[in-house]
Amino acid sequence: MTDYEYIIKQVKKFHFSGWDDEELRKCVDMLPGLSREQQVALFRSKWVEHEKTLKDAIFNLLFKERIEERDRKIKAMSVDELIENLHDENGYGKFIVLEMKDRYDSLDDADKVKILDTLSETTKANQNWAEGKRKKLNKENK
């Protein structure tokens, strides 16, 4: 039995019963050994339609270069560029927010305030995060 056949067998089996963590990990570890055509076929399979872990792993293999390029671009942006690109149509918004949050603690107060102001105008979760950070920043500056 090939790795592809083994993964398909496991995907069908666990589609109805829920994945065993060890078996899922084993299948994910086998993915890089598959051909691109097999990865695409598996990604498009109805059996993995609702299996996020496996589907994400395949997606990352299929689009590794694009994902790395996107990450390099985002990491190279200044705070002002991150803010400017947050609402662009490039679809990077979620990743830009993550980068802002990752950088936050290492920034000076002026850039922290820019990030807090920007994230306060987005989702409720970001608003809550910004509110908590703003309180902490205000205490530190008193």
Image: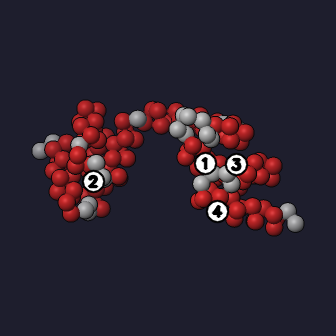
Q: Residue at x 50, y 36 (%)?
A: 68
In the rendered view, tell whether residue 1 sits above or below residue 70: below
Q: Report the amino acid beneath label 4.
A: Asn
- Mark 2, mark 1: which one is toward the viewer? 1
**Quarter the N terminus occupies:** top left
Q: Nearer the viewer, residue 14 or 76?
A: 14
The amino acid type, in three-letter code, at marker 1 is: Val
Q: Earlier in the sequence, mark 2 or mark 1?
A: 2
Counting residues from the start of the chain, the first of labels 3 and 4 encountered is: 3
Q: Name the residue nearer the viewer: 20 or 121.
A: 121
Disc 3: which residue: 118
Q: Nearer the viewer, mark 3 or mark 2?
A: 3
Label 4 vs label 2: CA separation?
Answer: 38 Å
Name the mark on residue 128.
4
Residue pointed to by mark 2: 26
C-alpha separation, residue under disc 3 versus residue under disc 4 = 12 Å
Residue hosting label 1:
97
- Residue 33 x %, y %: 27, 39
